[in-house]
Image (tube, coloured by chain):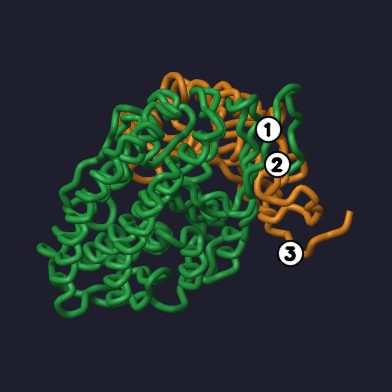
Chain colours: A green, B orange
Amino acid sequence: MSEPTITPDLMRISWGPQHPMSGQTRILLDVDGEKVHKIIADLGFTHRGIEKILENRSFLQGIVPIERMVMIDTANIGLGYVMAIEESLGIEVPERAHWIRSLVCELSRISSHLYAFGLQAESTGYFPAVFLWTTTDRTVLLDLMEELTGARFSYNFFLPGGVMKDLTEGFEDRVIEGVQYLRKRFEDYWTAMIENIVFEARCNDVAVLKPEDAIRLGATGPVLRGSGISIDVRKDEPYAAYGDLDFEVITESACDSMARTKVRYREIGQSLNMMEQVANEIPGGPIRTRFPLFTRSKPGEVYSRVETGRGEMGIHMFTAVGMNPYRVKINSPTLRNMYVFERLCELDEMLMADVPVVINSIDPWYLDSDR
Amino acid sequence: MSEAELVEAITTSHAEQIESAEVLRSQRVSVVVKREVFLEVAEALRDEYGFKTPSAAGGLDYPKEERMQMIYYLFNPDSKITLTLRVDLPRDDPTLPTLTGVWEAMSFHEREAHEMFGIEFEGHPNMIPLLMPPDWRGGYPLRKDFKGEAGEE
């Protein structure tokens, strides 16, 4: 990046690119003493050209690289791509597969939110223990995923037309056990973190993002809902089994860093309810329809949207006659939220010490914005 | 406003300015606009039709037809409709006015489309590479004729 000029009397601080909190990016901060005047996000350190890679892979092969976008939340990302394939090739999905997909997606979302939550604790500088707690509790979810999909991180579990494997015997009981364990842990998180006076002092009224600004700047996911706007793709445009599952869209009206953290906290509660519901009510039947290995597509286009842990992700897939997609445009949530982050210091007063707190309340994943 | 009503309203009030408008499926609307009056339609979409949220933007290359397309993704937070605003560009002169004056958050996406497709945005306030390295001279990676070899300056 050719660096923009700096106003006299300000000092420019380069934060990163070696892993500032999470992922590789460089944040340039123009500061006057403690006060941040300007933020410049220098993205692209982990650009791998996933959109180009997908053009040169068959539809099925593309499932593997696209999950590399967000390692912590692979199920939701993979589902968006698989849904685009299904819609463009006209493939039906059985009811049971929809429910299993929702279960896996919620497991993945909790795991992603837990990571964000732990980092937020770490960024306030007072609770390194909470990061270890969330990491330990995530193993409960990872063990479930390992049993179901055979992998702890990159599942490649969704196929066009359904899912790879059916639930193992007694899996529903283990899901309910896990849910009960996590619910108990979450009470501890609330008292140890959210209600803690130091955490409140660091997060309350920091980086206020008003609802109209959030909409105008294109914020998405927990950042948008933390500003009190009830937008969630799972509710607005139900996919997988979300039309049948009971959940509410979590919003917080305080619009600050604390509100965004609380949205994630309360969303985990909703996800746990959904997991329980899937375990109790999952319908029987086949888990996938046949998807021919070599499929020729017709010219057309499909735009599929999914709600990932970080917000709305859109996959715009253009097809021509052939075995590969003609072009896949990935609209990633982090790129949208990073623009909001650049503007936040102008919307509300921000100090140097707030920067780690604010950036973790945005919950960026730079591999997602860089693609 | 449903998708069909939206398309009808756009086609009647902006008949001169658009090339086509259609409903792709539920909650998806596509509008292709002429390049010269592109900003007027964008402003109308924001102020009259409620497409307040900019979601993304990206290019598309059709070398055989000698054209490119710039696609803007807009979202209406009330009716939950996603609208794709498209402009067809000739491949030898892919220039259009920037949309950052209407939705400032399009800045990042236009920078990306510039480095990936070579589309020029007139009046963009800060046209520096977003994802590619600053010393990249290998061409435009997402164009269809890109060979994947880094060139020398």
Q: Which mark sits nearer the N-terminus, 2 or 1?
A: 1
In the image: residue A324, left or right of residue A165: right
Q: CA distance from mark 2 to mark 1?
A: 8 Å
Question: The N terminus of chain A appears in which quarter of the rendering?
Answer: top right
Q: Is residue B110 left or right of residue A307?
A: right
Amino acid type at mark 2: Ile
Q: Residues under labels 3 and 2: Cα distance?
A: 19 Å
The extreme left residue here reads: A280
Q: Give the mark toward the camera: 3 or 2.
A: 3
B31 or A282: which is nearer to us? A282
Element on which disc 1 rests: strand
Q: Is residue B51 visible?
A: no
What chain is tagged by disc 3? B
Residue B32 or A46: which is nearer the viewer? A46
Q: Which residue is mark 1?
A: B96
Dots 3 and 2 on the same chain: yes
Give the percent coordinates (x, y) of residue B141: 70, 56
Residue under circle 3? B148
Q: Residues within 10 Å of mark 3 (few under 14, many from 20)?
A: few
Asked whether the residues under the numbered discs 2 and 1 touch, taking CB atoms below 8 Å apart as contact, a structural biologist would say yes
First in sequence: mark 3 vs mark 2: 2
Q: Is residue B27 above or below residue A130?
A: above
Residue A331: image x %, image y %? 50, 48
Q: Chain of mark 1?
A: B
Q: Which residue is mark 2?
A: B119
